[in-house]
Structures are given as structure tokens and as C-alpha cells.
Image: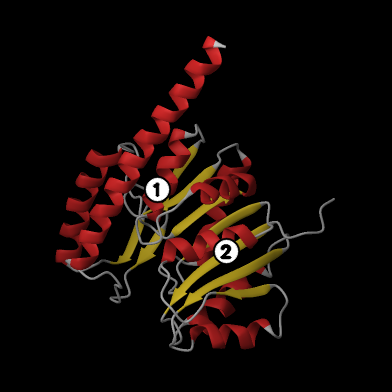
Amino acid sequence: MSTGPYLSLILPAYNEAATIRHTLHKAQSYLDRQQFLYEILVAADGNDGTRELVTEVAAQDCRIQVLGGPERAGKGRGIRMAVARAVGEIIGFADADDKTPIEELEKMLPWLGQGFDVVIGSRAVSESRIEIRQPLYRRLGSMGFGMLMHMAVGLWDIHDTQCGFKFFRGQVARDLFGRQRIDGYMFDVEVLYLARSSGYRIKEVGVCWRDDGDSRLELFAGNWRNMIDLLRICFGGRSAEKRRRSTEQQHHAA
């Protein structure tokens, strides 16, 4: 029997000094009641004191680790580095501002046990429950982004790529994030694109979600960067597919 953690929970935290202690306490209170071992990895960029607060907590509990530096490196990079360090049989991440309650994990794990490789929380399927909605302009922007994203990379059967509540079988997470390169917010799309291209089974599960009114996305500059990253995913995927086909043709010719 394995003596290591079953679950590695990653909390990407940027400017979360006001909330991170509460989020950690809530996560541990829930996980302590479960019948498995766990670890929590906090990827904390920035210089607002979040990383220092988590370091204090981690000094008292070896199940908590903290990563990151004073410079903003991006959510995608933070999670990528945390996955590389995680040792759990299941690896996943949740927003450090608790937009999706940790209790929703009980909806995710059974699907992983049934053979799915990637299980993602969703705000856009029938089982979803939105307690506090985003402002109308954010919702309209999300609809426009979704259409452009699907046109660029596909994933038409996935209704919500951006919910920050996703879990993976450990070896699948290590494979996907080992190949993932987008440092910003579009890393979710890239990981799902890689998962679909690799033939992994993806399950979308409706979860409870609430907006906290504290979006970190700059409306215009942020969306422009996101579009560039979508194009990187699209053309990077096509290049990879061409290389794969070329390799297969060379193999058959040999």
C-alpha cells in the first residue's frame, strides 16, 4: 500500500494575502475528514506577502509547500512548476480565492475512479450552480471569448474551459503539464487541447461557483494577450501534428 499522498491540491495564489489563510484552513478542514493522505502546494507569485504568509503556515505543517518568487510569472507557469513537484496519485488545482468550494471535490473524484483521465469543473452545464454571477459585461466578454476560442482550437464539446477547478490522474497531469508552455490564463485551453489531442478521456462536471468581483484580467490588454496565446496553441498544435505524421510516414517507409 502506498504511503504517499493520494491527492496533490495546487492553489495558484497571486495577491491573495487577505484570503489565503482562510482558503488553506477551509481546504485542510475538509481534507482532514477524508480517508486519504494529501498535500497542498501553493504557487504564490508577487510581493504582497502571500508567499510569506504561506511559508509561515508551511513551517508548522509538512503537508503544505510553497513555490514562487517576487516576480509575476503567470498562473500557467505556477501550476506547471507545482505539478512537477507534486507526488499525488491525483493532481488538481483550485482557485485560492475559493470561487469553487473545496467540497465540490466529491463530485470530481468518482469520475477519475471510473476511468476518466481529466475531470474539469464547469459553470456552464445543467448541473452547475452559480451563486453570485459575474457582471453582465464580463459574461458577454466570456461568451465572445468562448466562440473565438472554439473557432481557433476546437474543443466544441467542452462548455467551460476556464473554471479554475480541474483534476487529473497523476501521470496524466505530469505528461500534460510537462508539455504545456503557456504561462498566462490560456494554459487551461492548452492543457485541454493537449489532453484531447493525446486521446485522454475528459469529463466536464457542473460545480457550485461564485464570483468575488476581483478579476485579475485586464479587459483589453489581457484579452489581446489571450488571443495571441490562443494562436500559439492553434499553430503549435498543427506543427506538432505535422511532425507526428512525418515521423509515422518515416517509420512506415522504413
Q: Residue at x 41, y 75 (%)?
A: 72
Q: What residue type is labelled 2?
A: Ala
- Is 76 located above or below residue 115 in the figure? below
> In this view, which residue lies farthest toward the top?
253
* 1 horizontally vs 244: left or right: right
Secondary structure beneath label 2: helix
Q: Quadrant of residue 183?
A: bottom left
Which image quarter is the C terminus in? top right
Q: Where is residue 55 in the image (x, y as percent from the top left)?
A: 61, 84
- Is 70 located above or below residue 191 in the figure? below
Badge count: 2
The figure's colour scheme reads: secondary structure
Mark closest to the chain's N terminus, 1 or 2: 2
Between 145 and 6, the one nearer to me in the picture? 145
Q: Which amino acid does label 1 sit on?
A: Glu
Alpha carbon of mark 1 to alpha carbon of mark 2: how far? 17 Å
Q: Residue at x 46, y 74 (%)?
A: 13
Secondary structure beneath label 1: helix
Circle 2: is it few (<14), some (14-19), or many (20+) Cα within 10 Å? many
Q: Where is residue 69 in the image (x, y as percent from the top left)?
A: 51, 78
Q: Which residue, given by chain and number where applicable, does mark 2 sit on?
A: 82
Q: Which residue, given by chain and number where applicable, does mark 1 sit on?
A: 190
- Is 1 located above or below residue 8 in the figure? above
Circle 1: is it few (<14), some (14-19), or many (20+) Cα within 10 Å? many
Numbered badge on residue 226: none
* 247 horizontally vs 159: left or right: right
Q: Position of residue 238 (x, y in %)?
A: 35, 34
Q: Residue at x 45, y 41 (%)?
A: 194
Q: Position of residue 86 (x, y in %)?
A: 64, 60
* 97 horizontally vs 22: left or right: left
Are the residues flagged by discs 1 and 2 in contact, CB closer than 8 Å?
Answer: no
